[in-house]
Image: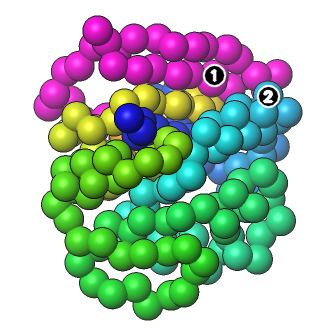
Amino acid sequence: MRKLVLYTLLSLDGAVDDPSQYFAGSDRGKAPAFDEAMIQNEAEIIGTQDTVLLGRHMFDEWAGYWPTSGEQPFADFINAVEKVVVTSRPLTRTWTNATAVPGPIEAVVRDLKAKPGRDIGVHGSIELARSLLEADLVDELRLVVGPTIGHGGRRLFSPERVRRLALLGARSSPSGTLLLAYGRAS
């Protein structure tokens, strides 16, 4: 069965709203600067995926950015991959291989997992990610943790529900970023 893999960039204190602040060499408001280990990590993750699940806000933002971006390897991947957008409204932007589907999220994920294919990725889409975590639908967490603290804004994890996870992998990049992988605990 396909896995739902949540890939998120965040600060050491869990902030998720402006990833450009969390990584060395990044310009605020622009895409975060990745070192070679971070690029390799991203390539490994997207290399297992053939579908991406997006929230409406992230879709609208990314549909205006990624089709003209040259940032690799993600640009080629996200522009070609099947994109399933969880929304109750019709899409107002066009983007290759994008389809709108209404919730509930549990049914959307169940239907995607029942289809043949590779992993299903969730990139960004923090509100969607939080909903997926709350509904216990995430099979694997792939976290890129920048070495900064003191950021305001939203956090990925909600304190309402405690879950134990199994560490699948951990390494650091030359810039001090942590590359973490967690799965469901047995």
Residue appearing at x 28%, y 84% in the figure: 89
Name the residue tied to disc 2.
37
Quarter of the image where one finds residue 88 = bottom left
In front here: 179 or 97? 97
Q: Quadrant of the N terminus?
A: top left
In front here: 93 or 139? 139
Position in image of residue 109 (x %, y %)? 29, 50
What residue type is disc 2 on?
Answer: Ala
Disc assigned to residue 139:
none
- Magenta segment: does it hold 43? no
What residue type is disc 1 on?
Answer: Leu
Please indicate whether residue 176 sits to the left or right of residue 102 in the image.
right
Residue appearing at x 52%, y 43% in the figure: 118
Q: Quadrant of the C terminus?
A: top left
Name the residue tied to disc 1.
178
Tag 2 and tag 1, C-beta contact below 8 Å: no
Is residue 8 something that shows in the picture? no
In front here: 138 or 51? 51
Residue appearing at x 50%, y 41% in the figure: 119
Range drawn in magenta: 157-186
In three-dimensional space, the C-alpha distance between marks 2 and 1, rounded to whole angstroms, equals 10 Å
